[in-house]
Image (cartoon, helix red, strand yellow):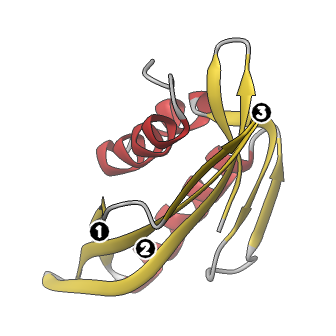
Amino acid sequence: MSTENPLAAVHQYIDGFNKGDAQLMAATFAVPGSILDGMAPHVWQGPTATQDWYRDVLVEGEQHGASGYLVTLGEALHNKITAESAYVVVPATMTFKVHGKQITQTGAVFTVALRKLIDGWRIAAWA
């Protein structure tokens, strides 16, 4: 697992999402962790926050005919490390299909707080 720096951990988490690999996402997440997202119920917390959020993404996607999610990240706007804590903000673009039609959402910002643990940087929270 490549989490030698905070930005690498963020990219690893997004790579897991893009591959549909909830286990890789969870491995990059601190326990417990928190997720704040525009999709209801909007907040996921605890030791299974990542898995619970990803399950809800798939359920909501199925309800709306959405699939094929892919997130790309831009250059970091903030990448600040203070001792064992880090704050990373990156522009994000998401593409997916709704009933076979390609959709691109631009202008999003992925904001992440991380903690340095014994085995590397882990995401403590994201919005």
Q: Is residue 11 above or below residue 58?
A: above
Circle 3 packing at 10 Å, graded few (<14), some (14-19), many (20+), is few
Q: Dividing the picture into quarters, in which one does residue 124 lie? A: top right
Q: Nearer the viewer, residue 38 or 83?
A: 83
Q: Amino acid at mark 1?
A: Ser
Residue identified by numbered label 3: 83
Of the image marks 2 and 1, the number of the one nearer the N terminus: 2
Q: Amino acid at mark 2?
A: Gly
Of the image marks 3 and 2, the number of the one nearer the N terminus: 2
Disc number placed over residue 61 in the picture, else none: 2
Q: Is residue 43 above or below residue 40?
A: above
Q: Nearer the viewer, residue 11 or 58?
A: 11
Answer yes or no: do the residues labelled 2 and 1 have beta carbons within 8 Å?
Answer: yes
Residue identified by numbered label 1: 67
Quarter of the picture containing the N terminus is top left
Q: Residue at x 49, y 76 (%)?
A: 109
Q: Nearer the viewer, residue 64 or 111?
A: 111
* Element type at mark 2: helix
* 55 to the left or right of 36: left
Q: Residue at x 31, y 85 (%)?
A: 105
- Percent from the top left, x then y, of residue 40? 69, 80
Q: Residue at x 43, y 36 (%)?
A: 8
Task: Report, in whole angstroms, how far the alpha carbon at label 1 lies from the one at label 3.
Answer: 39 Å
Q: Amino acid at mark 3?
A: Ala
Task: Report, in whole angstroms, how far the alpha carbon at label 3 lies from the one at label 2.
Answer: 39 Å
Q: Is residue 64 above or below residue 44?
A: below
* 68 to the left or right of 116: left
Quarter of the picture containing the C terminus is bottom right
- Percent from the top left, x then y, of residue 122? 65, 33
Task: Report, in whole angstroms, how far the alpha carbon at label 2 lies from the one at label 1.
Answer: 6 Å
